[in-house]
Image (cartoon, grey):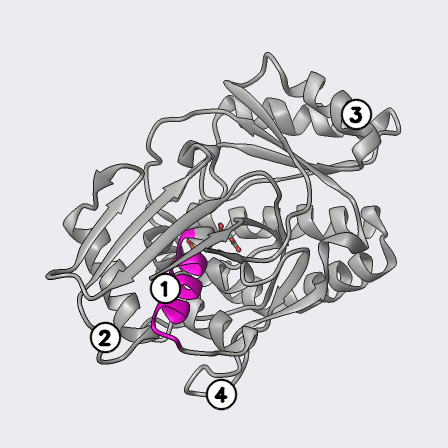
Amino acid sequence: MAQAVVHPNIALVKYWGKRDQDLNLPSTGSVSMTVSTFETRTRVMFGVPDDLAVLNGRTARPDEAVRIFEHLDRVVPGRRPAQVVSDNNFPSAAGLASSSSAFAALTVAAADAAGLEFTPRALSALARQGSGSASRSIWGGFVEWQRGSLIDGSDSHGVQIAPASHWDLRLVVAVVDSGRKPIGSRAGMNRTMATSPMYAAWVASYMADVKQARQGILDRDLEAVGDAMERSTLKMFSTMLTSVPPVRYWKPASLALQDAVYRLRDQGVPVWWTMDAGPNVKALTTPEHADTVRAAFEGGCEAVHVLGVGGPPRLEP
Ligand code: DP6
């Protein structure tokens, strides 16, 4: 038995689309920040009579169970039946890729429960096959998921750019709508790949954003990182909007929150926004300006969370 606690991550340069569905290989590289405070706690126990998964206190739906136990087969080939109990301490409606911490925690706990030792990169490549963004939650701080070029996907994994101690930042998360999203990220990105005429430009242009974000992180240059993040975000949404039918996640409140970020920036506040596969808006800023950003967001959304930079996965006794 083993129990792992893992933080989700937020993409600064986005992953949107796959070059291989079976191995879950991305069309582009991406860059992320692991966040503090929010975490997934997952316990894996082998040697029970049957596979059973309990997520946030309820039995997993059949589609969820299939994804979980197929992933366990991957991490521990020839495994025995297992019980998986997983809880998030944060609302999945916050739109912080909960699959990132979920599949990273499942990978780390399963490997430890089976007594298998993997390098972090091997763990990341395994987590990637559960959910792409999970490949980046194997480290704290700032992480790049390298696209890789090998056909077996073994070079498509995360690498840490810098640990959490490198740079103290805040992510201010504005929850716009806690309802279910119209289309999940996996289905959304597959539709985009299949139908958007902008998709080729997305793939052709990502590297400049990765380089700028990576260097910006190393230099602690928030403007460089924020600029790369907003550009990557807008390009990702341009591919979604030009899909057939369009993949639309933005709500009027999302645009109002973006406006609030631009207004603050005009006033000299260092803050940049991003969004993912949902209507929520997340803003990257310094610790000194987090309260100003929070105040600007309150009233324009259902809830605001202020997160820091999170550490690496940990195993609990
Ligand atoms: C918009 O990692 O959930 O959050 O690999 O199909 O499980 P799968 O996709 P997932 O997609 C995340 C998309 C995103 C951007 C990002 O996190 O890079």
Amino acid type for the residue under numbered disc 2: Arg
In the image, ligand 1 is in what quadrant? bottom left
Q: Residue at x 50, y 52 (%)?
A: 6
What residue would you read off at disc 3? Answer: 264
Q: Quadrant of residue 140?
A: bottom right
| Element type at mark 4 | loop
> What residue did someone put label 1 on?
130
What is the spatial separation of the Cα atoms under label 4 and label 2, in whole angstroms? 27 Å
Choose the circle earlier in sequence order: 3 or 4.
Answer: 4
214 lies left or right of 307: right
Labels 1 and 3: the sequence-earlier one: 1
Which residue carries the number 2 mark? 79
Q: Residues within 10 Å of mark 4 (few under 14, many from 20)?
A: few
Of residues 183 and 219, the one drawn nearer to the viewer in this rendering:
219
- Queried whether the magenta region covers residue 147, the answer comes back as no
Instruction: Select label 1 or label 4 by which is in front.
Output: 1
- The image quadrant that residue 209 belongs to is bottom right
User: Height in image: 148 above or below 133?
Assistant: below
